[in-house]
Amino acid sequence: MDTEIDSNFKLDEELAIQQQIAPITASDVADLLDSKIVIAGANISDVAFMETMLKISGFSDITGVHDGEGVLANLRQGIRDDICDVDLIVLDNNLSDMTAHDLRLIMDQFSEWRLIPIIALTKESQWDAAQLLTDLGHGVTSLHYRPLTAESFPPAVTTALAVKKERDLVSQRQMQLEDELATLKVMEARLQFSVTHDDLTGLSNRRRLEQALELSLTQTLNFNTSSALFYIDLDSFKVLNDAEGHEAGDTLLVQVADSLRSYFSTDDTLVRIGSDEYAVLVDNIDEHSAMDHAEGLRSLFDGYHFEFNEHYYHLSVSIGVKIIEGKNESSSGEVLSQANQACFTAKKRGRNRVHLFSLDDKEMHVLRHSVKWAPRIRAALKQENFLLELQPIYALASNSITHYECLIRMRGSDDTLYYPDDFIPVAEAMGLIHQIDLWVVNKAFDLMSQMPSDISISINLSGNIFLDRNLFPLVEKKLAQTGIEPNRIVFEITETSAISNFEQTKEMVERLRSLGCRFALDDFGAGFNSYSYLKHFPVDILKIDGGFITNLINDPVDQLLVKSMIDIAHSLGKTTVAEFVENQSTMDLLKSYGVDFVQGYLIGKPQVYLPNP
């Protein structure tokens, strides 16, 4: 029992200590004594008497005046940088031209004077409750009754000054809180804006377009109207981007967005789909007007020239047009897909043109591509005309290259080197992608057997390969043949591929991980459900989408989002890789965020691996 009492006593003692107000220090007293005081009274001798009492008590900055105008003059002259240096006004009620009530009304109109306390000196020396309530109701800080004595007047002044100091501290803290709140509101607004808008151009993004399309579908279905979706792709944008770099590409993309704003109405939905693709949804427009509108837009860009570093580039666009008539459409995704197909057809028919979607376009597209690319792909598979280039991945912790990413290329009959964008879409459409994926896995293992044992390789695979029952036996066989440590193998899968057949893909991923292989989720953050799938998808590494990295050094929103991705990944026990790192400042910023690996032209370009002799 005694122990419990002692414990409670100590607890009460600690609480009492915590609740104590910090004692006034010598510097606090000095600050109060240096305060600027204005004493106003009609009687010269009374003012002089009060000045003398305060000076004897240690106050040094005292000004006496004898009318209301003198008080106001001191207040006006005391303002510096929106702050008044007057700390207290002592106002005798014998002034004929100003009362404490009058002065308070004037001071309350100005923020510089509003916190300055007033001590009102009464004419009567006896207690008058009614007078006290009246004066306090008029905003007087305190009342002081005659006779004035050295024992009562200086302490009253000191108390009033202490109140003024406390008011100033509270006001400063309130201003700080308001500034912090304003900053938070700006950040919240930017984040909310980024949910439905493209960070680079400020146009709406695909999510906003899908919402607008759903509304248009409802409108056309119920009110017998029609709308048009324009799908716009910049011709040969990759040439500019590769030749001049991402800065030039971004500059052009912003200029294109501004041109679209000028050409279309504010009621139209302007969207950047991604990379160099845009879309515009126009409601209440018929087919004839839509085609005229699209042709006018094509002509506008056909006369456009882009200059960068004294180099000139001619700009043209391919435009696909999809007329939306509610009775014929099933979903916003179908409308967007058909507009994209129309644009692709326009590009394939020579670029710099407008094409209206029709149901025949898909078959024609497949036929043309089959004739051109399918034989090449089959020949490349048979004649071993595919090759792998390796791009280094740099580990910041060890300051060394610990990984390489495998990137497939195809060599044509004339030794032209083709990149994945040239042949992978056709391979997917023609059912040849599985053979390419299995070739990549087989070749990557062979390459690793020639590399140092501390180097890992990331292997890019299509989403559908994880549904192929031949993948697991092949990996198991190659591990046994080469003796490679399984944790040196990292399979990369994009978020889009992962979610297209989520359950089946997840099952295969788990089986491969059971062998000891690792997985990376590529282009993380590009999709709308990135965090949701991250929670459930068994991956070891997150590769942050390059769209967040290219302008990271200049974009506060990208910085906030990238830091968030890194923090969340680490909290889930996953490592992070940042792609598209092209300069040292971006790398330094990513390092400060705690990213584990970086990849990009700053570290090295993809190239064929040549083992040391």
Image (tube, helix red, strand yellow):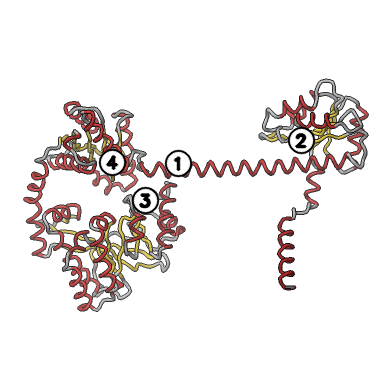
Q: Which residue is mark 3?
A: 548
Q: Name the amino acid, label 1.
A: Ala
Q: Earlier in the sequence, mark 2 or mark 1?
A: 2
Label 1: how many Cα within 10 Å (few below 14, some 14–19, many 20+): few
Residues marked 4 and 3 touching at CB (< 8 Å): no
Label 4: how many Cα within 10 Å (few below 14, some 14–19, many 20+): some
Q: Which residue is mark 2?
A: 117
Q: Which residue is mark 4?
A: 210
Residue 490 occupies which quadrant of the picture? Answer: bottom left
Q: Earlier in the sequence, mark 4 or mark 2?
A: 2
Residues marked 2 and 1 touching at CB (< 8 Å): no
Q: Which residue is mark 1?
A: 189
Q: Residue at x 80, y 47 (%)?
A: 30
Q: Earlier in the sequence, mark 4 or mark 3?
A: 4
The secondary element bearing badge 4 is classed as helix
| Residue nearest the observer in this picture, 3 or 36 | 3
Distance (Cα) linking label 4 and label 3: 22 Å
Residue 81 occupies which quadrant of the picture? Answer: top right
Q: Name the amino acid, label 4.
A: Glu
Residue 210 occupies which quadrant of the picture? Answer: top left
The secondary element bearing badge 3 is classed as helix
* View extreme (top): residue: 97
| Residue nearest the observer in this picture, 366 or 258 | 366
